Every structure is written in C-alpha cells, then in structure tokens.
C-alpha cells in the first residue's frame, strides 16, 4: 500500500491551505421503485408547495431544525407552457404539479435539441408518441408496449416507463403513487427528474444503445446520468426550469427511493443499481454534463456489490446488532456493531494508513452532551458523534444513534459513517492539517469513504493486505445508509459552507470510496 506517500500528500494539503426501468416487452425501460422503495419516509418532510410558482428558484432561508429539509419554493416554472405536451386523458384529477411537468417536458425537448448533437453528432428527433398521465379514473386508452394496452396497475408497478416500440412515456399520476408521495414530501422536482430519466431511455433508443443487449444496470446508470445532467442545467439556471438547493436535495432522495432492494445482484435482468450507484451516476451527470454520460456505455462507472456476504448477513438483513461488545477475543464471533467498528478504524488509521502520531481512539456512549466530559469537544454531537481531541475520545450520542439504527431507511452504517468521520478528523489532526471550515469537513467525508473502500468485499473477500484483527465488512445497503445520513446532516443550502451540502458531502464520500486515500489528497 502507498501509505507513506499518502500521508505526505495529506500533510501537504493542510500546509497549502494554511498558506492560501426493467424491460417491458423487450423495448420498454422503467423506473421501478415498487421493489426497492423504502418502507418508511427517509426524512421528516418539510412542507414544500408542489405547485408551479412564478417566483425565482433562489435558495431561501428557513427555520427548519438541523437535518430537516428546507421549506423552499420548488423549481421555477415559466409561464409559457404547452398544455398539450402531456396526454392527460379525459378524467384526470388536477395535480398541483401539472404545470411544472408541462414545463419540464418543454425544457427537456429544448435541451436535447442542443445536447443530442453534442453527444452523438446527429440532430435530435422529438418523441413520436405522447407522454401519458396514468391514474385510476382513466379509461382504457393507455397504449401497450407490445401488448394491446397498459393497465394502471402496470404503471403503478413501474412508476414510469419508456416504450421504444412506439416511442412514448407513461408515468403514474395517481394520488397514492410513489411519485405523488415524493412530490408531496419533497417537491415536484422529483417527478421532473424521473421524467428526465425516462427521456434518457429515449436517447438510448435513438443512439442505438437499447439495441446492444447490455445489462439493464448499464443503461439505467446512463439514464440516471442524463437525468443528473438535466438537473445540473436547471440548478445553474441555464434552461426554462430552475432548481433550488432543496430541489437538488430532493433529486438525490429520488435516486435512493428507486434503488434495487438490498441483496439483489445488480447484474440480474432488471437490475438498476444500489442507491449509492444511482446517486453516483446522477452526480456525474450533474457535474460533468451529457457528453460524459454518453461515454458511460463504453466506460461505465464502478458498481458496488449488493449481495449479502453470507447466511448470517442475510438473516440480519445486513445490520449488525447494536452494542459495544467485541465478542470472542480470538475469533470476534458475537461482536456487536461498535465492538468491531472501533478496532477496525483504529487499525486502519494506525497501521494500514500508517498515519504518523495517530493515537487509537475510544468510543464512549453518553445520553446527552452534558455527560461528554470534554473541554474541546468538536461539533457534530447533535448529529450522533463528536471527537474530543484532548482525550482521544469519540463521544457517541446514544439516543440519536439508536434512533437512526432503528429506522429502516438508515440502519447500522449510518453510525459507521458518522463515527468514521470522527476518526477521519483525528487522522487530519495527527497529520497536522490546518484546513478549516467546510473544506475540512468534506475531506473528513472523503477520508471516511477511503476507510470504507477497505471494508468493501471483492468477490465476497475483504481486500488485502490489511492489518490483522480487522473484521469489518460492509453489507448491501450500508453505502445507501451512509448517503442518506449525509443528506440528513448536510447544509440545507450549497452556500451555507459549514458541513457541506448533501450533494457535496456525498460527492466527497464517493471520491474516497471509489478512489481511496489518493482521491482525498487531490
């Protein structure tokens, strides 16, 4: 391992800062959320208006508690929209986001007229078929994809799908569907991103990608990337729809809500990828644009394993028992969550990463900050864990930790991510880093990800070489839990510059997971 060189690089950073859808009848692709959707909302929703405002999409201040979504206006909608852009049918109940979706489709067409030639060197051909709103009251007039018709039950299962046979898109417009729930909780931008994803499949039909018989997850990653590229355009105010920080945050949540179920091999037919993978593809498009997305077929993004490691992992649904027992001293059998995470982190930073002057840390659970006997306690206790540098202790906010652990949408590795960042802060201190503020927090995210890279199984085996006694191994869904936690604790606005916005934190964490310590030194 390149540990000595990496330590030098990390020290240099501190010094320089001080100086300055599955297939439907073969050709339909869908955004299948029914199998992978969370059983409970991942976050306490704010109260966004899901209508079509004419106000600007600039971020707004609010009095939300830390970790809660901002109560911000949803994406800006221009007043000049085509009411015929969506085939609403004769009996459609009016939805507060209808005008926003009409504007989204107009913007997608405008964007692809410009972007498609840049990616593929050919002119853009608009959809030949319609975009259909599906709802229970609608008569049997939804076209089929290789079948006589599409039922509303089919659409509910798929959430949204593109049919390459007749070049049309259908989305679930029912009051009880996942899209309506996402719009109610997080704003209409979530549905816009789903439609942008389905447009991505229309792009693939025109470019010939859907005719290449590729694994579903490969085409889904590219469609997620295209959706992210459109969202990036909206966030930069370059098109007819403008996204606020809250809309971008909601887009990340939408990617998590349509992930594959844990334990499913993403390369099985119909696999879409884990939440970590889908968010990652979205972010690549957001930051690098449609041309980079076009290259993903030949140069796909790395995918994280999503299968259970063994029968015990399956039985526990990927969650280790909450507790501090280290288990059998020789085998580690029976170890509880913090009983193996703490020694693993100490061995990684002290031995494998070989950080000079690193002192192993102790984790101490307390019930309140008053019990954390520390004169120089770092920030973050309210989120779950904080470092006390003077005593080489990490104080665990046990009530918060237990609450996160017990929620289906967070689980055990939400805590692995939080204490991993505390250990990363200790590593920065040992390296003499003088970086401050948001940048330091984001480096901690990256360093936590670099540790995680070393506990991701490769063909069900832990990466080697590694210090003897390290036993931590991530389970399917763990990385998704870390991403959810980053969204939960991140700054509400991208310009708040305290901990980093959810997008920035996830981006930094992913850099570490994929690129290791080298990525954090750049």
Image (spheres, rainbow, N blue to C red):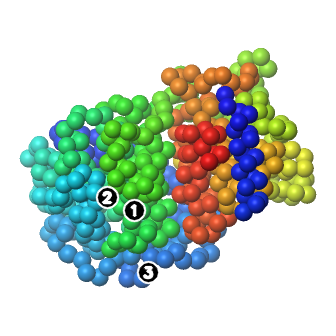
Residue at figure coordinates x 23%, y 42% from the top left: 209
Q: Is disc 2 in contact with disc 1, using a CB cutoff of under 8 Å?
A: yes
* Left or right position of 40 against 194: right
Could you tell which of marks 3 and 2 lies nearer the N-terminus? 3
Residue 257 seen in render: no
Residue at (55% x, 45% y) in the render: 510
Mark found first going from the N terminus, 2 or 1: 2
At which x and y percent is residue 1? 67, 28
On screen, residue 458 above or below 60? above
Rate crowding at label 3 as few (under 14), some (14 to 19) or many (20 or more) other CA atoms within 10 Å: some
Q: Secondary structure at mark 2?
A: helix
Mark 1 closeness class: few <14, some 14–19, many ≥20 residues within 10 Å: many
- Reply above or below: 511 against 374: above
Measure how far apart labels 3 and 1 are at the Cα level.
16 Å
Any mark on residue 56, and which? 3
Q: Residue at x 19, y 54 (%)?
A: 122
Whether residue 445 is visible, yes or no, is yes
- Going from N to C along the chain, the mark reached first, 3 or 1, is 3
Q: Position of residue 146 (x, y in %)?
A: 11, 43
| Cα–Cα gap, marks 2 and 1 | 8 Å
Identify the residue under disc 1: 231
- Which residue in the structure is indicated by mark 2? 196
Residue occupying image coordinates x 72% and y 63%: 20
Out of 268 and 303, give the one closest to the viewer. Answer: 303
Q: Is residue 468 left or right of residue 52?
A: right
Q: Are marks 3 and 1 in contact (CB under 8 Å)?
A: no
> Circle 1 sits in a helix, a strand or a loop, which is it?
helix
Whether residues under marks 3 and 2 lie with C-beta atoms below 8 angstroms apart, the answer is no
Categorize mark 2 by other alpha carbons within 10 Å: few (<14), some (14-19), many (20+). Answer: many
Distance from disc 3 to disc 2, alpha carbons, whole Å, reads 21 Å
């Amino acid at each position: 391992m390149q540990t000595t060189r990496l330590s030098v690089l990390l020290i240099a950073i501190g010094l320089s800062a001080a100086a300055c859808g599955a297939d439907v009848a073969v050709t339909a692709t869908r955004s299948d959320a029914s199998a992978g959707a969370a059983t409970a909302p991942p976050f306490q929703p704010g109260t966004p208006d899901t209508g079509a405002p004419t106000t600007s999409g600039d971020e707004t201040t609010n009095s939300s508690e830390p970790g809660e979504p901002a109560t911000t206006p949803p994406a800006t909608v221009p007043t000049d929209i085509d009411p015929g852009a969506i085939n609403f049918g004769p009996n459609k109940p009016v939805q507060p986001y209808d005008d926003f979706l009409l504007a989204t489709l107009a913007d997608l067409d405008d964007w692809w007229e410009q972007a498609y030639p840049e990616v593929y060197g050919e002119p853009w051909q608009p959809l030949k078929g319609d975009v259909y709103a599906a709802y229970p009251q609608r008569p049997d007039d939804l076209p089929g994809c290789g079948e006589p018709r599409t039922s509303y039950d089919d659409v509910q299962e798929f959430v949204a799908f593109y049919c390459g046979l007749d070049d049309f898109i259908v989305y679930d417009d029912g009051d009880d569907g996942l899209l309506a729930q996402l719009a109610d909780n997080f704003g209409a931008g979530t549905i816009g991103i789903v439609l942008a994803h389905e447009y991505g499949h229309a792009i693939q039909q025109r470019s010939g990608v859907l005719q290449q018989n590729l694994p579903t997850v490969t085409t889904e990653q590219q469609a997620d990337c295209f959706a992210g590229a459109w969202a990036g355009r909206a966030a930069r105010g370059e098109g007819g729809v403008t996204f606020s920080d809250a809309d971008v945050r909601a887009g990340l949540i939408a990617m998590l809500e349509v992930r594959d179920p844990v334990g499913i091999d993403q390369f099985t037919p119909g696999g879409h990828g884990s939440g970590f993978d889908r968010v990652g593809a979205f972010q690549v498009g957001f930051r690098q644009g449609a041309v980079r997305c076009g290259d993903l077929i030949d140069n796909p993004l790395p995918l994280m394993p999503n299968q259970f490691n063994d029968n015990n992992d399956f039985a526990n649904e990927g969650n280790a028992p909450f507790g501090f027992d280290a288990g059998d001293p020789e085998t580690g059998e029976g170890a509880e969550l913090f009983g193996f995470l703490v020694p693993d982190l100490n061995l990684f930073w002290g031995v494998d990463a070989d950080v000079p002057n690193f002192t192993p840390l102790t984790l101490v659970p307390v019930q309140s900050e008053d019990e954390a006997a520390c004169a120089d306690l770092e920030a973050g206790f309210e989120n779950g864990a904080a470092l006390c540098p003077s005593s080489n202790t990490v104080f665990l906010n046990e009530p918060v930790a237990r609450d996160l652990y017990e929620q289906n949408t967070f689980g055990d590795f939400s805590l692995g991510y939080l204490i991993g960042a505390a250990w990363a802060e200790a590593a920065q201190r040992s390296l003499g880093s003088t970086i401050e503020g948001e940048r330091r927090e984001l480096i901690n995210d990256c360093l936590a990800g670099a540790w995680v890279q070393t506990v991701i199984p490769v063909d069900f085996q832990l990466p080697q070489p590694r210090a003897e006694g390290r036993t931590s191994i991530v389970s399917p869904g763990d990385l998704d839990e870390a991403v959810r936690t980053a969204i939960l604790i991140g700054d509400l606005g991208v310009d708040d510059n305290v901990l980093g916005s959810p997008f920035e934190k996830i981006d930094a964490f992913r850099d570490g997971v994929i690129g290791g310590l080298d990525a954090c030194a750049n």
